[in-house]
């Protein structure tokens, strides 16, 4: 689980990782970096900080 947490932290702080890279990995499209980062932060909170509910990607 720690490996997943570390990966999320790296992705959220990596300025070179954006919607195109995420789409290549997941086949889920985001309209812009801000929307992707908000989704990833919400997912991180859900997985590791007892966030209220699992966020849904756009679509």
Image (tube, helix red, strand yellow):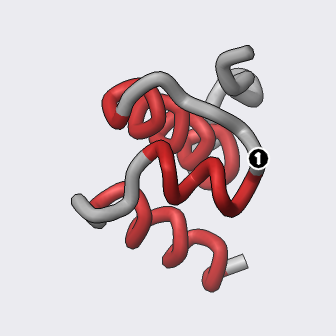
Vertical side of 19 occupied by 34: above or below: above
Quadrant containing the C terminus is top right
**42 horizontally vs 50: left or right:** left
Quadrant containing the N terminus is bottom right
Image coords of residue 7 (percent x, y): 53, 74
**7 horizontally vs 57: left or right:** left
Q: Which residue is more in the foreground, 59 or 47?
A: 59
Q: Residue at x 51, y 58 (%)?
A: 21
Q: Residue at x 52, y 64 (%)?
A: 8
Which residue in the protein does label 1 denote? Answer: 27
Question: In which quadrant of the rendered view does residue 45 lie?
Answer: top right
**29 horizontally vs 11: left or right:** right
Q: Residue at x 66, y 18 (%)?
A: 58
- Secondary element under disc 1, as helix, strand or loop, is loop
Mark 1 neighbour density, 10 Å: few (under 14) some (14–19) many (20 or more): few
Vertical side of 12 occupied by 56: above or below: above
Image coords of residue 48 (percent x, y): 61, 54
**45 horizontally vs 47: left or right:** left
Q: Residue at x 50, y 77 (%)?
A: 6
Q: Residue furthest bottom?
A: 3
Vertical side of 46 occupied by 12: above or below: below
Image coords of residue 9 (percent x, y): 42, 66
Q: Residue furthest top?
A: 59
Vertical side of 5 occupied by 25: above or below: above
Q: Which residue is more in the foreground, 27 or 38?
A: 27
Q: How many marks?
A: 1
Q: Which residue is more in the foreground, 12 or 59?
A: 59
């Amino acid at each position: 689980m720690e490996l997943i947490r570390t990966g999320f932290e790296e992705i959220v702080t990596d300025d070179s990782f954006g919607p195109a890279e995420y789409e290549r990995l997941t086949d889920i499209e985001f309209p812009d970096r801000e929307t992707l980062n908000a989704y990833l932060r919400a997912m991180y909170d859900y997985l590791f900080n007892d966030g209220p509910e699992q966020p849904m990607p756009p679509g």
